[in-house]
Image: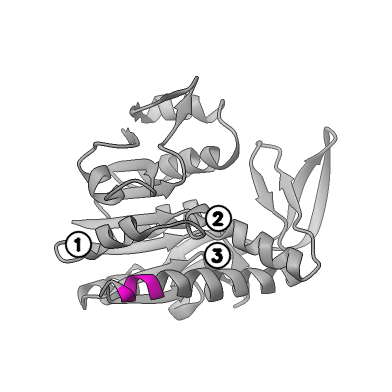
């Protein structure tokens, strides 16, 4: 089985020994690729350098980071440096043959740079120019498969390369969905710091695509992006997406057994 695992940036600062132990067992029987986030780490480094992060809301209601040139440099520091290498080091300590890379390396993720984004402020639209975020156009699945087929686990930071060969910031959840498609993953497990989709205080265990689309109109914050990425993954051909906590015991194994989280299928 081929499994794509997305690790939210919120997990990177938490105790993840059980997750790493789980991955060390699963890689003996399955091919895995990990994609990670790093939003909290970007914020931490930005503030230490005296640059306040700018988070904006799009007309469609999604929150995102305005990534100017300086923020792009900080993103590379946080994602490719701190978060990626910390995850690789943890995996290596558990005898997992992990290889850390970004979408820049080997043109793993090619994206179209947006340059400008539209934000809603006080009910009015505002255009912010000089942005370095990207819209994914292509994933080098052949490279990732080559790494996996040789017994290694690729750990990918969501930094892409633009059509003009510039680094661009990517949404980690959507990058994971496209990578899942590129490696022909059987399942996409999105790990976060909550049990799954919570509505009215209750965990939603199962959603079909139509139900997930309805839910998308109601949820906010990080979960909204995860539901959107799940829908995108389904449309790209992934059969099953599971959003669940990475803080539980054996989180990925439990997800594969459909014991935890929110399971989204067609």
Residue pictured at 60% horizontal, 70% vertical: 78
Q: Is residue 149 above or below residue 182?
A: below
Q: Position of residue 209 (x, y in %)?
A: 38, 30
What residue is at 46 percent from the left and 28 percent from the top? 198
Left or right of 122 on screen, residue 68: left
Q: CA distance from mark 2 to mark 3?
A: 11 Å
Q: Nearer the viewer, residue 130 or 33?
A: 33
| Dot label at residue 198 | none
Could you tell whether 55 is left or right of 134 in the image? right
Disc 2, SS: loop
The kind of secondary structure the magenta stretch mainly shows is: helix
The residue carrying mark 2 is 171
The answer to whether residue 128 shows anywhere in this view is yes
> Nearer the N terminus, badge 3 or badge 1?
1
234 vs 117: above or below: above
Name the secondary structure under disc 1: helix
Left or right for 90, reference 8: left
Looking at the rendered structure, the secondary structure element under dot 3 is strand
**Quadrant (top left, top right, bottom left, bottom right) of the C terminus:** top left
Applied colour scheme:
one colour
Residue 43 at x, y = what percent?
68, 60
For mark 3, does the 10 Å Cα neighbourhood hold few (<14), some (14 to 19), or many (20 or more) residues? many
Residue 43 lies within the magenta run: no
Q: Is residue 92 magenta?
A: yes
* Span colored in magenta: 89-93
| Residue at image mark 1 | 25
Q: In the image, residue 55 lies at what x, y percent?
A: 72, 50
Q: Are marks 1 and 2 in contact (CB under 8 Å)?
A: no
Residue 111 bears which disc, if any? 3
Q: Quarter of the image containing the N terminus?
A: bottom left
């Amino acid at each position: 089985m081929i499994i794509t695992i997305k690790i939210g940036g919120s997990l990177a600062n938490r105790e993840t020994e059980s997750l790493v132990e789980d991955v060390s067992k699963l890689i003996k029987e399955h091919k895995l690729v990990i994609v990670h986030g790093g939003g909290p780490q970007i914020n931490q480094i930005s503030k230490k350098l005296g640059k306040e992060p700018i988070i904006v809301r799009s007309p469609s209601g999604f929150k995102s980071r305005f990534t100017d040139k300086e923020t792009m440099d900080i993103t590379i520091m946080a994602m490719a440096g701190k978060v990626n290498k910390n995850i690789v080091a943890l995996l290596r300590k558990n005898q997992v043959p992990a290889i850390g890379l970004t979408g820049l390396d080997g043109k793993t993720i090619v994206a179209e740079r947006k340059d400008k984004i539209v934000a809603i402020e006080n009910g009015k639209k505002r255009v912010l120019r000089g942005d370095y975020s990207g819209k994914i156009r292509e994933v080098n699945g052949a490279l990732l498969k080559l790494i996996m087929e040789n017994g290694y686990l690729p750990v990918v930071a969501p930094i892409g390369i633009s059509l003009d060969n510039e680094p661009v910031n990517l949404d980690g959840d959507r990058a994971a969905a496209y990578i899942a498609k590129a490696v022909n993953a059987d399942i996409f497990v999105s790990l976060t710091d909550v049990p799954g989709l919570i509505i009215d205080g209750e965990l939603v265990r199962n959603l079909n695509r139509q139900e997930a689309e309805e839910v998308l109109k109601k949820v906010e914050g990080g979960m909204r992006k995860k539901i959107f990425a799940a829908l995108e993954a389904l449309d790209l051909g992934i059969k099953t997406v599971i959003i669940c906590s990475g803080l539980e015991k054996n989180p990925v194994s439990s997800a594969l057994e459909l014991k935890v989280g929110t399971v989204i299928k067609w």
